[in-house]
Image: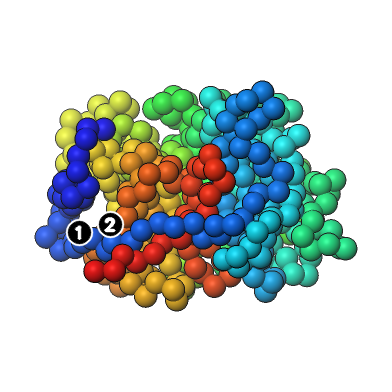
């Protein structure tokens, strides 16, 4: 990345983002404004129980926060998951000083710095967690190379801040060809089913064409029922999944044609599923996921032909593929190179962000709010909020829907909040 001033960088982003919307450019209608915020630690005195910044052999061990969510039981506690295999719990108070270890599965999770897209990647609490104490995690197991697992765990009946590590019930297992593009985001939908975001299996160009193959789970978003079991599976298949009756198709698939979903959440108001898909050569994209939708990878990257795969000579020829779903937004690699998707904000702390989809870029640190008109089905504004100096790994939220930014940290200040810059 060249040394570009923040103002020039934002102007470049406005021009490129406005001009890249195809097939119907809307740059004249898109407001590319600056809505300035700064970052500050949300819990400045918080210590992560058991985490040490330096290993016994003197190596730096960064805090790698990957998920921050409530459990939905009305306690207002926050559960923060690290990629290395620990889930912390702590009270949602600015003066909180110490976490408790809710679950430690480092002995089962494979994480390696040079293959850092594996690890403990997904956490979701059952919609009836207050009654049944069940939650689910997605992780890379160290028992088999490049294999992802979804397991059910249960909380201790005697201590709400402690999960039972020996309660693990594996419900899903998937072998992956490479260490990268594991996806791993899991969330429960308003229908009570568990949605699972999977990458295409890794390497570059999707070499096995997984994302366009309904016969494999890779490159898809799955929809499964954790409260039942279909024959031969640790989970049930919802009868209204789009490919249940299609010969040769995996019945778990809800949508496909995705490269590496990184950030996937339902809007609690509209019930729509938003997903950020990490690009490869040129474009990062944001999608609203529809049942049965094909989101184009590896035929397209964003709105555009994926040249390494396709021989079609023009964008016009590519647009004839009307069976492919288009993203609602994309941005060029001159702006950022790895999208970190968030969620549609429905909290009260930031009125200016109400209804906006929040996202950022892991590489450049730019953070935006994307405003989408549900009736018109188009973006009306994309506002730059800030540029941060720490890698943005994920977004978090609490029971009130208030937002947090989760950043790689050598000092343990991994959970941040936005603060408006006074004009």
147 lies left or right of 25: right
Q: Nearer the viewer, mark 1 or mark 2?
A: 2
Q: Residue at x 57, y 51 (%)?
A: 67
Report the quarter where the C terminus lies: bottom left
Q: Splitting the image into 4 quarters, where does residue 259 fall? A: top left
Whether 137 is drawn above or below 228: the answer is: above
Residue beneath disc 2: 384
Q: Residue at x 63, y 41 (%)?
A: 120
Q: Splitting the image into 4 quarters, where does residue 209 fall? A: top left
> Residue 385 shows which numbered tag?
none
Whether 343 is drawn above or below 82: the answer is: below
Q: Residues within 10 Å of mark 2 (few under 14, many from 20)?
A: many
**Image coords of residue 333 (percent x, y):** 27, 38
Residue beneath disc 1: 32
Q: Residue at x 59, y 57 (%)?
A: 45
Q: Earlier in the sequence, mark 1 or mark 2?
A: 1
Q: Residue at x 41, y 62 (%)?
A: 418
């Amino acid at each position: 990345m060249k040394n570009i001033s923040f103002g020039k960088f934002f102007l470049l982003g406005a021009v490129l983002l406005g001009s890249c919307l195809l097939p119907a450019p809307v740059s004249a209608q898109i407001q590319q404004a600056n809505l300035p915020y700064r970052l500050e630690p949300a819990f400045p005195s918080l210590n992560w129980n058991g985490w040490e910044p330096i290993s016994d052999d003197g190596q730096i061990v960064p805090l790698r926060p990957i998920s921050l969510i409530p459990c939905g039981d009305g306690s207002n506690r926050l559960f923060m998951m690290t990629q290395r295999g620990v889930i912390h719990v702590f009270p949602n108070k600015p003066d909180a000083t110490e976490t408790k270890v809710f679950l430690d599965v480092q002995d089962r999770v494979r994480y390696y710095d040079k293959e850092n897209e594996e690890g403990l990647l997904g956490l979701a609490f059952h919609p009836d967690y207050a009654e049944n104490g069940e939650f689910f995690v997605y992780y890379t197991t160290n028992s088999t190379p490049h294999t992802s697992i979804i397991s059910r765990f249960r909380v201790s009946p005697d201590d709400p801040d402690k999960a039972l590590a020996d309660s693990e019930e594996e419900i899903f297992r998937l072998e992956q060809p490479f260490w990268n593009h594991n996806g791993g985001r899991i969330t429960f939908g308003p229908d009570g089913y568990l949605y699972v975001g999977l990458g295409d299996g890794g390497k570059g160009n999707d070499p096995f064409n997984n994302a366009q193959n309904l016969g494999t789970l890779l490159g898809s978003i799955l929809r499964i029922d954790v409260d039942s079991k279909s024959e031969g599976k640790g989970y049930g298949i919802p009868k209204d999944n789009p490919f249940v009756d299609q010969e040769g198709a995996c019945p778990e698939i809800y949508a496909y044609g995705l490269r590496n979903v990184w950030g996937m959440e339902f809007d609690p108001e509209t019930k729509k599923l938003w997903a950020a898909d990490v690009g490869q050569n040129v474009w990062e994209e944001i999608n609203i996921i529809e049942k049965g939708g094909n989101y184009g990878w590896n035929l397209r990257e964003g709105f555009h032909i994926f040249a390494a795969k396709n021989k079609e000579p023009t964008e016009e020829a590519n647009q004839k593929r009307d069976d492919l779903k288009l993203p609602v937004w994309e941005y060029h690699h001159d702006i950022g190179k790895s999208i970190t998707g968030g969620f549609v904000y429905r909290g009260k702390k930031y009125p200016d962000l109400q209804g906006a989809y929040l996202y950022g870029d892991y590489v450049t640190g730019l953070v935006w709010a994307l405003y989408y008109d549900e009736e018109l089905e188009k973006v009306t504004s994309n506002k730059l909020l800030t540029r941060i100096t720490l890698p943005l790994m994920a977004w978090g939220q609490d029971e009130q829907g208030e937002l947090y930014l989760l950043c790689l940290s050598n000092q343990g200040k991994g959970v941040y909040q936005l603060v408006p810059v006074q004009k």
